[in-house]
Amino acid sequence: MKLEGGCYCGALRYVAEGEPRMKAQCHCRECQYITGGGPNLFMLMPQEGFAYTKGAPKLFTRSDLDQPVTREFCAECGTHIVTRRPGLPLVVLKIGTLDEPALFEGPRMAIYTIDKQSFHAIPEGLPSFERLPSR
Ligand SMILES: [Zn+2]
Ligand SMILES: [Zn+2]
């Protein structure tokens, strides 16, 4: 599939091509900062199929962690677009940045429920994991 999207102000635009590897909602504490408090809805897309077609993101990587992720966001409006993890050939793409978020079709699992807040909802029957599913 070929997905297109961008940030809230339009300074960043991207294409993401390929098959999604995972569609999920993440309840981790870090994601709560980024979403506004709820779980973060994302899909993993192949890194080679992802490219910015307009603008360049600002990057943020924590310096106090061993294997920190790098978060890419719009320097103008602050919209967080993707996260990259060292050694993972995938980007973690935020669903809210898609031109057509409906293409997501919903999460297939809930992860990091160890950090779940009491006001977070998990759809009935959705597989959920304290951290990540084992491979
Ligand atoms: Zn923007
Ligand atoms: Zn998370």
Image (spheres, rainbow, N blue to C red):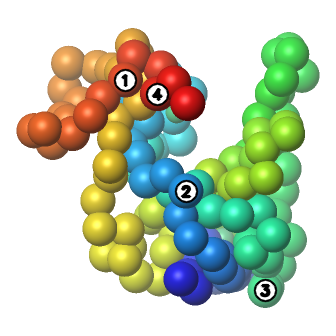
Mark 1 highlights which residue?
129
Q: Is 100 positioned to the left or the right of 9 in the image?
A: left
3D distance between C-alphas at marks 2 and 1? 17 Å
Which of the pair 59/52 is nearer the observer?
52
Secondary element at tag 3: strand
Tell me which residue sits at (53%, 41%) in the image. Answer: 34
Dot 4 alpha-carbon crowd within 10 angstroms: few under 14, some 14 to 19, many 20 or more? few
Q: Residue at x 81, y 27 (%)?
A: 68
| Disc number for residue 21 | 2
Disc 4 versus disc 2: distance between alpha carbons?
Answer: 13 Å
Q: Measuring from the top left, give residue 60's x and y in whole percent.
A: 82, 42
Q: Is mark 1 within 8 Å of ligand 2?
A: no
Q: On the image, numbered disc 4 is attached to which residue? A: 133
Q: Residues within 10 Å of mark 3 (few under 14, many from 20)?
A: few
- Distance, label 3 to label 2, CA atoms, is 22 Å
Going 49% across and 52% down the picture, which residue do you hit?
22
- Point out the tag, 3 or 4, that comes first from the N-terminus: 3
Residue 67: which quarter of the image? Answer: top right
Foreground: disc 3 or disc 1: 1
Q: Secondary structure at mark 4?
A: loop
Q: CA distance from mark 1 to mark 4?
A: 6 Å
